[in-house]
Image (tube, helix red, strand yellow):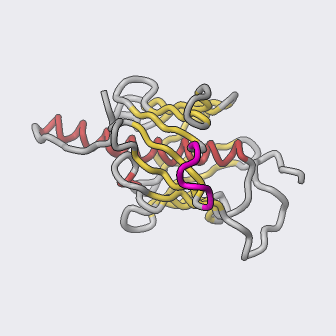
Amino acid sequence: MNTSKNGFQGGHIPPNAPHTTLIITPDLERKNGSSVSKADSVTDSQPLYTITSKSSKPHVTVTQGSTTGEIGTATFHKFTSFNTDLQYRDQKITMYPGLSTGSHQFYYPGMGKLEWRTEGGSEVELRDSKEKTLARLCDLKAIGRMETELIVESKCSEEFEGFLLLSAVALGVRSHLLIATLGDAIGVSVVGTGVGG
């Protein structure tokens, strides 16, 4: 099966193309960790990915499985720029605020500009330059707090799937850090940010 350079397979994707659902579940014992599994996998198997978040750099780390080395990190710039540096395998990509409120965009090799966009409530969608929805994160605010789903709408490479996960989780963790930082600035304690020290 050939995978295109951009991570998605084939040119035309039929309307009933299979999608992949990744379940992101916070680790109740480690307040700064989450495990990721596919919706159709056995519940007591090893996680597909493990996510760790913290308040120091890198702010988010993604590892394959539960014990192998890291495959991606996210580092947040100061809150005056709102940029996020995503390092995934051999690629370094900067995600930056888009023109619409709550949107973040980046350029992915072979695909051009992609944008995470709020679609009402706490759901965000990743769209390409033709407005095609590539992925949906069901609840941005749930990252690190409650179970949520990342739905990849079309079949794609494992590498691109991991990158989508990193960018979605970085967006969620960044929103928690922003709320905590603003709370500190005005003297309000914010509980349950999903980010450990």
Q: Residue at x 34, y 34 (%)?
A: 79
Q: Residue 148: x, y in percent?
A: 44, 57
Q: Closest to the observer: 64 or 76?
A: 64
Q: Residue at x 44, y 42 (%)?
A: 34
In screen coordinates, is 95 left or right of 178?
right
Q: Closest to the observer: 92 or 17?
A: 17
In screen coordinates, is 143 left or right of 3?
left
The answer to whether any part of residue 189 appears in the image is: yes
Instruction: Please identify the residue farthest to the front as the structure is shown.
Output: 44
Q: Residue at x 41, y 59 (%)?
A: 139
Q: Quadrant of residue 40?
A: bottom right
Check residue 41 for magenta coloring. yes
Instruction: Please identify the residue farthest to the bottom as the structure is shown.
Output: 15
Quadrant containing the C terminus in the rendered view: top left
In screen coordinates, is 10 left or right of 85?
right
The correct choice, above or below, for 158 with respect to 38 in the image is: above
The correct choice, above or below, for 4 with respect to 131 in the image is: above
Q: Closest to the observer: 119 or 30?
A: 30
Q: Quadrant of residue 10?
A: bottom right
The correct choice, above or below, for 86 with respect to 143 in the image is: above
Check residue 110 for magenta coloring. no
Instruction: Please identify the residue farthest to the left as the structure is shown.
Output: 187
What residue range appears in magenta? 40-46
Q: Residue at x 65, y 58 (%)?
A: 129
